[in-house]
Amino acid sequence: MTPALSWTEGRIEDTVGGEDAAALLRELIDGRAPIRAGITGPGGAGKSTLLHELAVALRAAGVEVVTGVDDRTNAENCTQGTTLLVDDAEHLSDDEASALTSLVRADGPHIVLAFRPWPRSDAVARLVDRFGRERPHLVLQYLSVSGIRRWARVLLGDELRDEEVQRVLDLTGGSPRFVDHVLLALRDDGWDLRATTPLPATALERLRHRVDRLDPELRDFIVALAVGFSASGPALAMSARFAGSDLRELMTAARASGVVSPDGALLPIARITVLQSTPAHELWPIQRELVDAVEAAGVPLGDTAVELARHGFRDPRVAEALRSHADDALPTEPVEAWHLYAACIEAGSDVGALAGRRAQAAWSAGDVRAAERLLDGVLTPGEHPDLPRVMKVAGAVWARKGMLRRAADAYAGLAETADPTAAPLAAMTLAMLGEPERSRSILAMAPEMEYPTSSQLAVSLTAEGILDALEGAPDRGLSALLQASSLMNESDESVALPEVPAVLAAHVALNAGELGIAVEALRSATDAAQGGPAFRNRLRLTHALVALRADDPARARALLETATSSHRPLGLRDEVLAHSVRIGLARRTDDLATLVRAWNGARQTVVRMPIDLTALPALAELAIAAARLHESHFVAEPLERAWALLDGLGRAASWSTNLHWAAVQAAILRNDGSDLAAHSTALRDHGEADRVASRLAEAGDVWASALAGDVDLPTVEHAVRDLALAGYPWDASRLAGHAAARAADHQDTLRLLAVARHLHPEGSMLDAQREQVEGVDARHDDGTLSPREREVARLVLEGRTYAEIGASIYISPRTAEHHIARIRRRLGVTTRSDLLARLRVVLDDEDDAR
């Protein structure tokens, strides 16, 4: 039985194939004619290990083995049946090669030569070629992923994770020798495979010894490759150090040594070894030679500049190469640009001069706080060398914080310097502040961009679109904004902006009652990461606000939770959006306790909320909630600023309609007849020019009539249908419910409740109204109060009458009376004093439980 090669169980089967090695072993044991075989591969491929395995297996089979070429290698000792194993045959002298050649005869021994591809003397070359003609050399290849995984199991006794196996392969190229060193460093020294982790001292010493054994000229060549010289570039030929060297021969020697891959690249583990073990004073001259040679060759430093900076080499040429590389990466790869600018500083660049670029990279990568910190350091008196960029990033940061006026002034100032890219930014921002005339003036004076990028075209279209929407052409404006949003989605370029086109398009669509268009624009922008990470949560929150309007609370809640659970902080404008969605969700579920908590959490933000066109829907939601909670004074000042903005636009119908509608609802909640009449009149006045305003005006009149007890079924149904078509399905459901509660005819009530249920099937308000009409109570009288009953109970404790309770929570006095009667029954009380005493205890207990 032929003995097995134990090494094949670990590596050989993955490199040359276990069958090839085993077949050679069988022939050496059983073959009658002399066998001449060659085993070749670069240094570290495993030639010596395989020869050792062959020797052990042959001796176990009773075969005489002679190793090496020495005095025993003669006709008397190496007879037929003996196996001669010769390692490092490339180093044989001519005499040794001749001695081996003399043994190649019919009655001679088996001979197995192991040799590197290079160097060879003529005598060795002839011998190797002769062996190769008799049988193909057994060529050892490097390990693959599966081979490394199996060998790691042998050496470590455990499995490596896939990413660890890949990292070992990346470091070593699969060279068995280097794989051994890396795995031993893992096993014995607990080395972390991350690229930034230095090699342990013991592993470094073993690896350094391999490099130090190389010929001095070859070692210099390896060091040159380690610091950044490319084997295929012109820099090596331009280097004075290698002026008299045969570079082709050096590369051949490097490949044969096993520290260079077949494509001429130095193995990463060898580079780490050289750079970590070579003193800085020895590296610096050759690093300098590299930069000089690259400059003389007239080629860019490229990635070599990064490596030079990373290893502490400082040179203005390296810094400039890194800056240029970072500038190229900045529009589409901001994270890479950020790291390149850091390397640029390490190479000696001025920190202040790069602040604007680094701030733009930070903004585009979503780290707004880092961008702001960098800007704080350069926004001081005096001219900055990169002022336009600094001011554009600063404008985006200020806009996010709610300081649109400051951003607009910054952009306008840049536009006055004939910066063509600043004018659309200024126009967009001023339009959001309600200043279309100044916006148009800035655009008119701006020079045309000769070769605009897709993102620059998108910004220009955004400015035009929002201005059209302000100037009485909302359909044309929406078209331009949607086109701008599509362009921005398709562009890979990241630009610091005060607002993204998708958000403005959504607001224009919202004004027009086109909720589907708003949702699609925001969804597409979110999928395309429009504006980069800095706008991710703004897109989500705007989408949540649209979902709230579309009566899709589940979607609104999911978007809100995703945005507010993000590790990225919200800017002030986004905080306002988040609070308005949270409050809107509580209001639509008629959960007073949740609404109060949400309102209390928002009060500080409401007081300081910035006002621009995109804030109006959020302000409308806050104004209704404030009226519901008797805290309208909190929104008085923001509303005053909002009306002033709209007054400057001539109360443009498409932008003011929603706020008028919110004011109508707030007036109903406050029982403020004069305010109700004023805003209803404003909606009617706008109705001639705006279809949404016309529908809202009708709905407002019908709602007021219904609350007064005048319910005409066809009129209410028509108003409800139009209100839903105008983009207010939840309000339409609420109108139907209120009218149902006040209808004189029982069949009209049931019909209106069915309409309300169809529009809003999950409304808690409708549950109470249905119970009142149908005489149904699905809850058990177990002494606990529903959310609606707790709301009524708190108002009872405040001493409110049935009418006041109804006005406060949008129900009729009759429905309020019904709730109170049911509360009495639940609590088992008959007198008012007992009811008040019991309510205080129950509400206190339930509050404590929460």
Image (cartoon, helix red, strand yellow):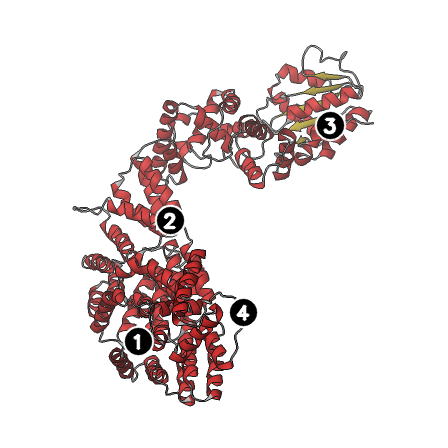
Label 4 vs 3, first from the N-terminus:
3
Disc 2: which residue: 334
Label 2 vs 1, first from the N-terminus:
2
Q: Is residue 141 left or right of residue 733?
A: right
- Whole-angstrom CA distance, mark 3 to mark 1, is 85 Å
- The residue lying at 37 percent from left, 39 percent from top is 301
Q: Are marks 3 and 1 in contact (CB under 8 Å)?
A: no
Q: Are marks 4 and 3 in contact (CB under 8 Å)?
A: no
Disc 1: which residue: 654
The kind of residue on which mark 3 rests is Leu
Label 1 vs 4, first from the N-terminus:
1
At mark 4, the secondary structure is: loop
The kind of residue on which mark 4 rests is His
- Which-is-in-front pick, marks 1 and 4? 4
For the image, the number of numbered tags is 4
Q: Viewer-proximal residue, 848 or 728?
A: 848
Instruction: Measuring from the top left, give residue 527's x and y in whole percent.
Output: 45, 60
Disc 1: CA contacts within 10 A as few (<14), some (14-19) or many (>=20): many
Label 3 vs 2, first from the N-terminus:
3
- Which-is-in-front pick, marks 3 and 2? 2
Disc 3: which residue: 5
